[in-house]
Image (cartoon, grey):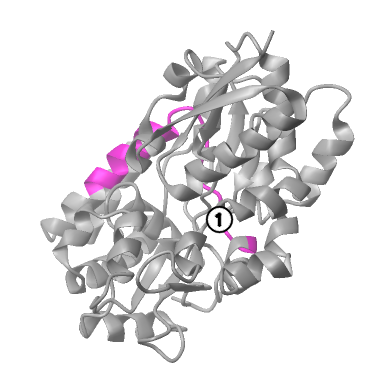
Amino acid sequence: MTTRLKGMTWSHPRGFDPMVACSALWREKTGVEIEWDKRSLQDFESFPVEELARNYDLIVIDHPHVGQITAEDCLAPLDVPGREAEREELAAGSVGRSYESYAWEGRQRAFPIDAAAQVLAWRTDRLDAPPATWSDVLVLARDGQAMLPLRPPHNLMSFFTLAANLGHPCASTAGPEIIAPQAGATVFEMLRELADLVDPACMEMDPIAVSERMAEDGSPIACAPLIYGYANYAIAGFRPHRIAFADIAAAGTNGSAGSALGGTGIAVSARSSERAAAIDFAYWVASGSVQRGPFAEAGGQPGHAAAWDDERVNAATGGFYRDTRKTLDGAWMRPRHDGYMAFQQAASDRLNAGLVEKEPAETVVADLNRLFAS
């Protein structure tokens, strides 16, 4: 009897195509069939994992969910006995803190299959080099050549990145405040300055929407200074114009450190009737050989350093991985405790309200701290 699994990922070639391609190879290898569904990026970032776990065996998740899914007991830990050597290989191949980001309360809740952080996107046909400092970014913005994804939660991710890059990282665990009031006000004013210079449509745009706009024929946009990198857009022919990616521009004296870590992980439902088969696939698809091979070849953005270091993978994407690796290795990890996801949505909405209504920075930051404490 054929074993059949159902998986849920996110709706973009980067999120869907490699899972389908790798599952076809897995079927040839093991006979196990996996059918994949997909949700929009917005749904992926906010839809309750617990609900998905009732209907799917395999779920692609975002690491800030781990505290909540642990409390709900809806995902099966992947650190099963007898596979320690495989996990050591996965941990050794972590890009930045990607592997660590899926560990919670002493258990491994998912394996990274996609590594990302906010990086800088730029058009090589419009600029001689990517902007190196935040001042350089503002020059481009004043000239109408910059965009910034400000649709929640990406506005909050930019707040996080700027704070950490300035040397004032936001809290990564539950506590009385997300950031010191004065530091938070400085960050908000920096974000507001850029938000006032870019197209107001950015308030409703996520990284995919901004990347699509940048890659259009006739686009005036030469730079997106804080955006989750999409290696697909760095491939010649993917869109009318190729987008290059680089380490983030320095806002302070810390170089490219502090970018808000993103990416995705492969998790297994605790309610799956085929848990062992699902766990086997999770180990395989996260492994270095698969990540730098069929996963990358199918348009995925690997989460394993074996792919990020691979010359062939870099050549296919115009050096995407090599040119952003420093930012990934210095990335900052968001809070992951149970309750953080509700804060992320509320704080993102509060940030945009403050930006649109031109509210005092101190008022907005006080509300962010109040929301975080609660």
The residue at the far left in this view is 357
| Three-letter code for the amino acid on which mark 1 is drawn | Trp
Image point 23% across, 60% down: which residue? 361
Label 1 secondary element: loop
Is-magenta flag for residue 31?
no
> Residue 145 location in percent, x, y?
26, 80
Left or right, 288 with reference to 134: right
> Residue 15 location in percent, x, y?
49, 44
Of the pair 69 and 173, the residue shown nearer to us: 69
Is-magenta flag for residue 342?
yes
Which quadrant of the figure has residue 83?
Answer: top right
Residue at the disc numbered 1: 332
Q: Is residue 302 visible?
A: no
Image point 57% across, 39% down: which residue? 19
The residue at the far bottom in this view is 128
Give the vertical position of 267 relative to 344 (above or below). Answer: above
Give the vertical position of 246 relative to 265 (above or below). Answer: below
Of the pair 164 and 310, the residue shown nearer to us: 310
Image point 46% across, 24% down: which residue? 49
Number of numbered tags placed on the structure image: 1
Q: Quadrant of the C terminus?
A: top left
Give the vertical position of 345 relative to 33 (above or below). Answer: below
Residue interval drawn in magenta: 329-350
Left or right, 264 with reference to 309: left
Give the vertical position of 191 relative to 75 (above or below). Answer: below
Of the pair 242 and 244, the residue shown nearer to us: 242
Q: Quadrant of the N terminus?
A: top right
Q: Is residue 275 visible?
A: yes
Could you classify mark 1 by the number of other residues whose Cα lies within 10 Å: few (under 14), some (14-19), or many (20 or more)? many
> Residue 210 location in percent, x, y?
30, 62
Image point 68% across, 28% down: which residue? 27
Left or right, 20 with reference to 339: right
